[in-house]
Amino acid sequence: MMHFDESMALIESLEIGQYKTKKLYITDAVGHVLAEDIIADHNSPEFPTSAMDGYAIRGEDQKIGRLKIASINPAGSALSDKVRGGICIKTFTGSLMPEGADTLIPIENVTVEGNDILINEAVPHGFSVREVGENYAKGQKLIEAGTKIDFSHIGVLASLNIVHVSVYLKPTVAILSTGSELLDLGEMQTNDAQIRSSNNYVVEAIVRKYDGIPMQLGCIKDDKKSITTAISEALEKSDVVVTTGGVSVGDFDFVKDVIRELGCEVIFKGVRVKPGQHIMVARKGDRFIVGLPGFAYSATVMALVYVVPLLEKLQQGKSTMHTVKAKLTEPFVKRAKKEEFTACNISLVDGKYYVDFKGKKLGTSAILTNMLGNTALLVTSEDETSKEAGDEVTVLLFG
Ligand code: AMP
Ligand code: MG
């Protein structure tokens, strides 16, 4: 079995033949990964602009105390009047500053007397004037390719008069669970040995959350022929196929054999991780297959660890999951000499992360409920041993 780090390095170094992109209307692009750098083609603002309602003046004229109002300069008008010594121009939020003026004295700081203003409270030189390029400067890279587009990017795109942006297509992910014991949603139970399938829905949710387009294919019995047909059809219509179950060493674990027999190139099979050591990742040309284990907790963790980075890789996106350092508030017992992912409660107090295991059950990898609550995954490498309260640990956040 492979070291965990080696398996991650293999995912990171996967060669992707062709990235698929398309142009989308900017707000439709939210949640997609940007496929081009966004560079400012102008300064914003292009000219010194007033940030308040008031009077454009020469800062030094404030010592005169009384200035003549020469004209009015509403937002959107291209004013030709200039400010000279002893005069001011009434100017509003968003109006260009008239030539000759360097300071905006707010309405609140003056009294109007006839056609004059009296300065009650002086302001510093340059007050309330938005300088050229205050927002961004021409030539500046504002959003980098690889960024996942969010509402904050839309304002910048719109202000650059960009209507459509180039984004990476979200990969389509076909999902199927294997197991003769599985009942799909709504399916009637006919014997006591049957269990409700949850894995295919957890994977569907993870795919949706981490920017893939899920294609739910349901459950398939442990029958080699059916599994072969299902996986080969899934490979035809999707970028990634995610299966659950059937990768272990039991007599009815056919998925691992089928993947090989379909002529896929195995990238790895078996990693020293807990849970999920039978994980399998393979490819057929530009299509990928991730064979997740069957146990519910294992399937969830392995999907987070391997499927999410693969989806990001297929869109050239930046990693959305990250690890943080946290302090243990109770001891941690290392159970295996493997990279271990342990469900824990995470809290943030005064800017520091703390970890405990209250309510988390010790048991098999079937315990799905350990993922409920404010959960993160405590990550320990295969060389690490048990830890004491107060020790610093690494935690994978996905909330
Ligand atoms: P397997 O990896 O196929 O040997 O499955 C291991 C265990 O995970 C079995 O006890 C199954 O009952 C359980 N399991 C398999 N598939 C699912 C599923 N889709 N949803 C929930 N549990 C499952
Ligand atoms: Mg099975």
Image (spheres, rainbow, N blue to C red):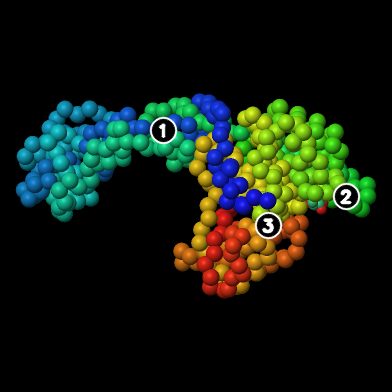
- Please name the residue that numbered disc 1 is placed on: 37
Q: Is residue 322 left or right of residue 45?
A: right
Identify which residue is drawn at 78% across, 36% down. Answer: 258
Identify which residue is drawn at 12% across, 46% down. Answer: 59
User: Could you classify mark 3 by the number of other residues whose Cα lies within 10 Å: few (under 14), some (14-19), or many (20 or more)?
Assistant: many
Does residue 285 appear in this view? yes
The first of marks 2 and 3 along the sequence is 2
Residue type at mark 3 is Lys
User: Could you classify mark 2 by the number of other residues whose Cα lies within 10 Å: few (under 14), some (14-19), or many (20 or more)?
Assistant: some
Quadrant of the rendered structure where residue 308 is?
top right
CB contact under 8 Å: marks 2 and 3: no
Spatial separation of the CA atoms under disc 2 and disc 1: 52 Å
Does residue 113 appear in this view? no
Residue type at mark 1 is Asp
Nearer to us in this view, 47 or 300? 300
Question: Residue 194: which disc?
Answer: 2
Residue type at mark 2 is Gln
Q: Is residue 78 above or below residue 209?
A: above
Nearer to us in this view, 261 or 363? 261
Spatial separation of the CA atoms under disc 2 and disc 3: 26 Å
